[in-house]
Structures are given as structure tokens and as C-alpha cells.
């Protein structure tokens, strides 16, 4: 079993694989990240059967936390399988912070957090802002400290889908991109390594100052969102809120009472950036 | 643990770990009851003392709300 | 096959000994503890002892998890209690939920999954109806599995609660009806001890016998290290001089003397449980069981697939007469082809 280890923010992963290639790809993209001695979670990329290790090889994800019925991926998407495996461990296992399915960027010690359904654009917006003056903190999960309420960075490889790939190729001119994986269950996917300041400062938290619910594909608009609606939407965006019990409740209630929230609609990156800057000046 | 937000109130129930989002008069009923075992009429009387309404008329409504709260597990039915 | 499972056994038996572990050792230990569902227990045993920072974070996370599972389990039991409030007979909690409900050491840090209860077989229709009425529903729609369950198994087909998304297993005895040992379910119910809230747990001897039956007569040995840890805790906490003759005669009555004796012996051999000398005499398959129980590599993977297949067949062999087994496996394979 080949092995790869990486530290991302406060989480340490050990990834095993029966094939070397996906781990080589991971190692190359994560080359500037710290290597942990004792991992928090271990996952394994394994073949579905002995035969399928070699013929139309197919990757099943096993490890500390597993989904029993998950469909295996073809070996060319092994890198994607590894990223999904890490997401799964965080989503099912992490108890050290409130975990929000959201993206975040930082400026002046304060965090802008964006959350919404798949396709809302939170991932792409974070990638974009992270290359235009903000520090990228993460595009998949935002971790909220249970004592301080700070947002803690979790800067994994940015997962770009379909049109976002082209947009970021044009924006991140010095960016390091992973291989193109066409026709995955979620469309075309390509990974982008976060900017060097995101990696260098992955241990530096930021106080949440603005929460946005972006919706891509509509005329520019802004709407205030009340605390009880924010609370409901954030609990839906959190996989570990229930497990955290009382601490989860107090952290999240404090969050919705102190962080202003807006829903924004936008048609493209330029509009989005303008709305963000406007709201940041108003609220943060 | 009870946290009022805009028009709704969050109630965290320690025993179950469930967070309930309730609208009035649920938080007011819970607060008026405290830890006591009461009939719907008694609850109505306590609330009428605090708020402005006729406790006799409200008793049925309060009884319905108490049933709902019992189904959620926030109050427990006991039999005298 | 390496036997890294011994790392876990040693750590539970002698927590201070973990001071000798290097990072690779900790990595293996924690991975194996996870797969054996003993991480919460390990976290409890290591509480207060110096460990590397990274390990401390992992253990703290495990403690939060254990507390969450405990809370959920007790609430689920309470929901079942309220749903069955009109049932006059005993509702007996089993396994992890029973340990925490009764405040036993075996429940401390324990991983708890579904809610397991036992009731009298004659009253199953009433229990079923009450649960369905209170928001539980059937998990499987498959008619074949349903017939198999009702006729041969020791429990109803699985039920899950609509809103809470938690499963309940309703048992009427502790082993499948087609298995060779025929334990006395009525006696278990009759001797069940009452808890303050109106639910029940098995008597101390029955609790141990159930755990032993679950481990061996079920056949697959999955979760064996945890099962034996439960038994270690049960003995440690409640076995006085009167316990041992009572255990022997009760186990014999349930036709489960050999599994009970073996479980007690293995707990002693692995975890150092204090047992009377009369119970210690080893039998040659013990070594084989210990090897099987501790067979894990540093990724937490168990024995080779072929051995697992043999154990799957063996476990079904123990549950069903050979002709039925062949028919059952044939139907299963046909459907999955």
C-alpha cells in the first residue's frame, strides 16, 4: 500500500492507495503543505475486486469513515476519490469546530463566509477573491471555533467545475492546476492549488464579519437575511452541529447574533466582486 | 437553553440534544411552567396574569399547544 | 498477517504503557481502535495521561463523540419507552444502551449504534403496532428477507424512526431460532432488573451470557475485541463470589456454557480480567481465537478475504441447518447476480 500524508489547517490525513499514480498527483499538488506525523484520519483507495485492480481499474474509498453504498470511481479520477475521501472524514468525523459547508476568504483579520447549495458559486467566488487581494481560507468547509467563534482556515485544493475552470485559468495566471478530469458525476473537474499565502497562513484564524448566501445566474440584487433564517440555513449546512450538542448550539447562536448576513444574486465574477466590496464596506 | 432571535425562539433541549425552533406562544408557555406539573387551565391562568387575555377562552388553545410540545418532547404528560 | 490488534489490547490493559509508542505506533493504535469501535473507550482510559498533542486532539474528539452517542442512545430509549407506555410487559434494553442506562462501567466511552430491546415473543404484534404508530417504519421492503426474518431470526425486521433516522431492533430471544443452542428467553425476561424509568436490563449473569452468545454463536467474531472488553468490565464491576456458580448454572440452562466459559477465558487472557482459577484452564482453540481477534495491519484491515468468506459461511452454518443454508445462500447469490 502506497502512502501519502498531508496537513490541511488543523486536520491531518493519511491516504493509502493500491495504485501509485493518484498519490503522486496529490503529492505534487500538495508539495508546499506540511507533512503530519500522526494523522487524524486514514483513508484507503482500494480496488473493488482483485480483477478490477488491473482491468478497468476502479477505486473504492475505505477508511475511518465510510459510506457503504458509494459507487467506485475509475482510476483516472483517483485524485478526485482521494479528495472526496478527505471530505467524508471531515463531514462525518470532525468534532473540534462547528463544521459549515461553506467557503471563506480573509481580509484585515476578518472573514467573509459564503454558503449555499452546490452551484451557488461559493467555491468559485472564494477562488476568485483569493486571487484578487483576499486570503483564501477554504472552498469546501469553514471551521468555527467553539470558544472564540473565529473562522479557522481549511485550505484544500480548490475544486473547480465546468465553466469555473476556464474562468480561473484566466484569473490565476501563475496558478498550479491539477489534471483535467472530464465527465465525472459532477461534470468536468479540475483542481487548483491555493495561493501561497493561503498555505503559509493556514494556521491563522479570522473573526467572521460577513455571511453571504450567493446565487449565481440572477440579476444583481442584495437582500438582508434575518437571524432565525440564518440559523436554520446554517444548521442545514453543518454535518456536525447535532453531534456537538450544547457547544454547537451556543457557538451557532452567537454566530447568528453577531455576524451580519446578506443574500446576493449575481451574473458574473465582476458583479459579485463589486457586491462583495460594497457589503464589506457597509458591514464588516 | 433558550435563545430568542427575531420572530422565532431557539430552544436547545439538553437531554435529547435536539434544537427546536418555536414561535410564540411556545416559549412563553415553557417559561410560565418552569419545572412545575400543571393542567392546561393552570398554565392559562399563569399566562393571563402576565399577558393580556382571558384565561378561560385561551385554555383550549393552550391545551393544543401543550399537546404539540409533548409530541416534541419539550414537556412531558404526567397522570395525577 | 500481522497482529497489530495487540497494540489496542495492550493499551486498554496498561494505558500508561502507551508512553513507549512512537508516531507510527500511535497511528496504528488509533486506526485500529477506530475500526474496532473502541476509540471512545481508549480515550477514556487515557484520560489524564500525557500523550502527544495530535493524539490529545483525536482523543478529545472521541470523547465528544462518545458523549453524543450516549445522549442519543438514552433519548432513543426514552422515545421507545413513551411509545410503548401502554404495554404492560417488560421492555428490556440490551447491549450498549443497557450499559449506559444502568450506569455500568461497560458503558463508559462506549460506541453505541442502534437501539436493541427484547420483549416476549407472544406480544410482538402489539409492540410492532405501537412502534409503527409512534413514527417508526420498516427499513426493507424485500419480501424474502422479511419471511426469513420472521420465521428464523431472533428479532423483527429492522425498523427506523422517520424523523430521528435511528434504527430499533426488537428481539424476542438472543439467538436465531434455527441456531443450535436454545436459550430460555422467558427466563431472561422474568429475571430482568428494573431501571428507575420503567425500562429493564438483563440480570448480571444474563448480560454476560448474551454478550458471549453474541460474540461466538453469531460466528463472525466482528467486534470481538469490544465484546470481550464489555465482558471484562461486567466481570470487573459486578462479579462477586456468588456470581460464578450462578453464571455457570445459568449459562448451562441457556445451553451456552461453552461460549460463556470461552468468553470469560479470553477476556482474562487479553485484558487480564480477574477470574477464579477454575475458569482459567485454557483450551487449544483459544490461541486461534486470539489470533483471529487481533489480526489487523496498521491500516486496520482484517484477515484475508477468503478467510472472511469461510467465516461468513461458518456463521450461517451455526445459525441454520445445512440444507437451509444452501437454499438461503443460493437465493441470495441469485438475487445479487
Image (spheres, coloured by chain):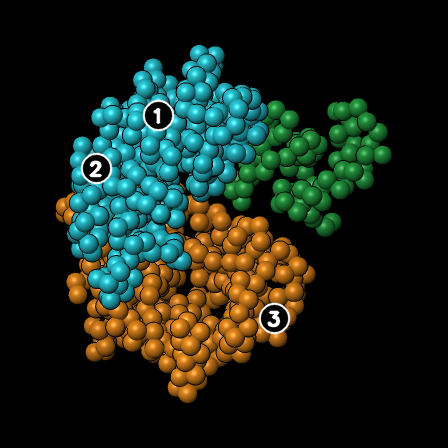
Give the letter of the chain under mark 1: A
Q: Quadrant of residue A47?
A: bottom left
Secondary structure of the residue carrying numbered label 1: helix
Give above or below for A66 relative to C324. above
Residue occupied by mark 2: A29
Give above or below for B30 relative to C32. above
Give the letter of the chain under mark 2: A
Tally of numbered tags: 3
Q: Colour of chain A?
A: cyan
Q: Colour of chain B?
A: green
Residue occupied by mark 1: A128
Tell me the residue at 43%/28% (across/down). Answer: A114
Q: CA distance from mark 2 to mark 3?
A: 58 Å
Give above or below for C166 relative to C147. above
In-front residue for pair A74/C16: A74
Q: For this view, does A21 lie left or right of residue B35? A: left
In-front residue for pair B76/A66: A66
**Res. C77 visible in picture:** yes
Label 1 environment density (alpha carbons within 10 Å; few <14, some 14–19, many ≥20)? many
Image quarter hosting the N terminus of chain A: bottom left
Q: CA distance from mark 1 to mark 3?
A: 61 Å
Amino acid at each position: 500500500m502506497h502512502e501519502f500524508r498531508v496537513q490541511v489547517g488543523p486536520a491531518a490525513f493519511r491516504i493509502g492507495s493500491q495504485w501509485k499514480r493518484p498519490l503522486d498527483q496529490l503529492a505534487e499538488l500538495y508539495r508546499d503543505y506540511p507533512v503530519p506525523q500522526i494523522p487524524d484520519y486514514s483513508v484507503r483507495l482500494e480496488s473493488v475486486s482483485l480483477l478490477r485492480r488491473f482491468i478497468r481499474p476502479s477505486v473504492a474509498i475505505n477508511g475511518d469513515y465510510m459510506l457503504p453504498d458509494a459507487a467506485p470511481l475509475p482510476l483516472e479520477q483517483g485524485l478526485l476519490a482521494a479528495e472526496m475521501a478527505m471530505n467524508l472524514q471531515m463531514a462525518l468525523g470532525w468534532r473540534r469546530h462547528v463544521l459549515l459547508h461553506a467557503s471563506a476568504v480573509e481580509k484585515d483579520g476578518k472573514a467573509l463566509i459564503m454558503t449555499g447549495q452546490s452551484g451557488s458559486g461559493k467555491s468559485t467566488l472564494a477562488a476568485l477573491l483569493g486571487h484578487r487581494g483576499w486570503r483564501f481560507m477554504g472552498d469546501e468547509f469553514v471551521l468555527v471555533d467553539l470558544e472564540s467563534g473565529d473562522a479557522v482556515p481549511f485550505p484544500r485544493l480548490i475544486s473547480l467545475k465546468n465553466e469555473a475552470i476556464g474562468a480561473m485559468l484566466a484569473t490565476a495566471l501563475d496558478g498550479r492546476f491539477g489534471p483535467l478530469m472530464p465527465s465525472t458525476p459532477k461534470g468536468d473537474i479540475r483542481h487548483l492549488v491555493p495561493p501561497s499565502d493561503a498555505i503559509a497562513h493556514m494556521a491563522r484564524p479570522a473573526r467572521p464579519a460577513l455571511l453571504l448566501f450567493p446565487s449565481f445566474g440572477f440579476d444583481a440584487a442584495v437582500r438582508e437575511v434575518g437571524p432565525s433564517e440564518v440559523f436554520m440555513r446554517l444548521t442545514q449546512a453543518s454535518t456536525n452541529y447535532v453531534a456537538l450538542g450544547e457547544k454547537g448550539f451556543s457557538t451557532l447562536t452567537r454566530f447568528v447574533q453577531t455576524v451580519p448576513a446578506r443574500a446576493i444574486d449575481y451574473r458574473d465574477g465582476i458583479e459579485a466582486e463589486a457586491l462583495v466590496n460594497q457589503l464589506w464596506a457597509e458591514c464588516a | 437553553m433558550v435563545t430568542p432571535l427575531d420572530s422565532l425562539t431557539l430552544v436547545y433541549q439538553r437531554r435529547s440534544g435536539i434544537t427546536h425552533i418555536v414561535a410564540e406562544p411556545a416559549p412563553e408557555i415553557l417559561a410560565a411552567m418552569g419545572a412545575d406539573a400543571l393542567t392546561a387551565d393552570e398554565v392559562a391562568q399563569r399566562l393571563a396574569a402576565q399577558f393580556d387575555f382571558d384565561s378561560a377562552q385561551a385554555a383550549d388553545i393552550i391545551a393544543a399547544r401543550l399537546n404539540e410540545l409533548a409530541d416534541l418532547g419539550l414537556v412531558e404528560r404526567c397522570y395525577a | 498477517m500481522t497482529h497489530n490488534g495487540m497494540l489496542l489490547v495492550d493499551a486498554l490493559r496498561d494505558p500508561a504503557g502507551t508512553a513507549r509508542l512512537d508516531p507510527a505506533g500511535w497511528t496504528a493504535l488509533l486506526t485500529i481502535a477506530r475500526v474496532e469501535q473502541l476509540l471512545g473507550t481508549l480515550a477514556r482510559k487515557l484520560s489524564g495521561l500525557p500523550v502527544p498533542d495530535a493524539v490529545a486532539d483525536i482523543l478529545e474528539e472521541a470523547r465528544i463523540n462518545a458523549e453524543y452517542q450516549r445522549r442519543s442512545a438514552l433519548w432513543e430509549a426514552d422515545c421507545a419507552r413513551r411509545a410503548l407506555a401502554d404495554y404492560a410487559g417488560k421492555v428490556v434494553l440490551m447491549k450498549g444502551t443497557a450499559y449506559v442506562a444502568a450506569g455500568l462501567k461497560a458503558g463508559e466511552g462506549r460506541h453505541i449504534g442502534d437501539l436493541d430491546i427484547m420483549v416476549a415473543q407472544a406480544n410482538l404484534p402489539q409492540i410492532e403496532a405501537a412502534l409503527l404508530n409512534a413514527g417508526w417504519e420498516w427499513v426493507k421492503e424485500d419480501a424474502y428477507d422479511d419471511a426469513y426474518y420472521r420465521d428464523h431470526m431472533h428479532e423483527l425486521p429492522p425498523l427506523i424512526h422517520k424523523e430521528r433516522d435511528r434504527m430499533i431492533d426488537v428481539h424476542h430471544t438472543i439467538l436465531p431460532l434455527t441456531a443450535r443452542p436454545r436459550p430460555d428467553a422467558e427466563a431472561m425476561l422474568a429475571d430482568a432488573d428494573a431501571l428507575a424509568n420503567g425500562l429493564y436490563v438483563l440480570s448480571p449473569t444474563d448480560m454476560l451470557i448474551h454478550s458471549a452468545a453474541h460474540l461466538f454463536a453469531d460466528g463472525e467474531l466482528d467486534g470481538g475485541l469490544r465484546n470481550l472488553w464489555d465482558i471484562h468490565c461486567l466481570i470487573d464491576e459486578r462479579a462477586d463470589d456468588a456470581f460464578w456458580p450462578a453464571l455457570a448454572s445459568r449459562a448451562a440452562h441457556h445451553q451456552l456454557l461453552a461460549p460463556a466459559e470461552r468468553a470469560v477465558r479470553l477476556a482474562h487472557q487479553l485484558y487480564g480480567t480477574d477470574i477464579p482459577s477454575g475458569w482459567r484452564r485454557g483450551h487449544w482453540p483459544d490461541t486461534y481465537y486470539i489470533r483471529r481477534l487481533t489480526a489487523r495491519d496498521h491500516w486496520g484491515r482484517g484477515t484475508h478475504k477468503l478467510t472472511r468468506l469461510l467465516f461468513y459461511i461458518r456463521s450461517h452454518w451455526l445459525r441454520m441447518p445445512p440444507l437451509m443454508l444452501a437454499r438461503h445462500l443460493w437465493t441470495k447469490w441469485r438475487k445479487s447476480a
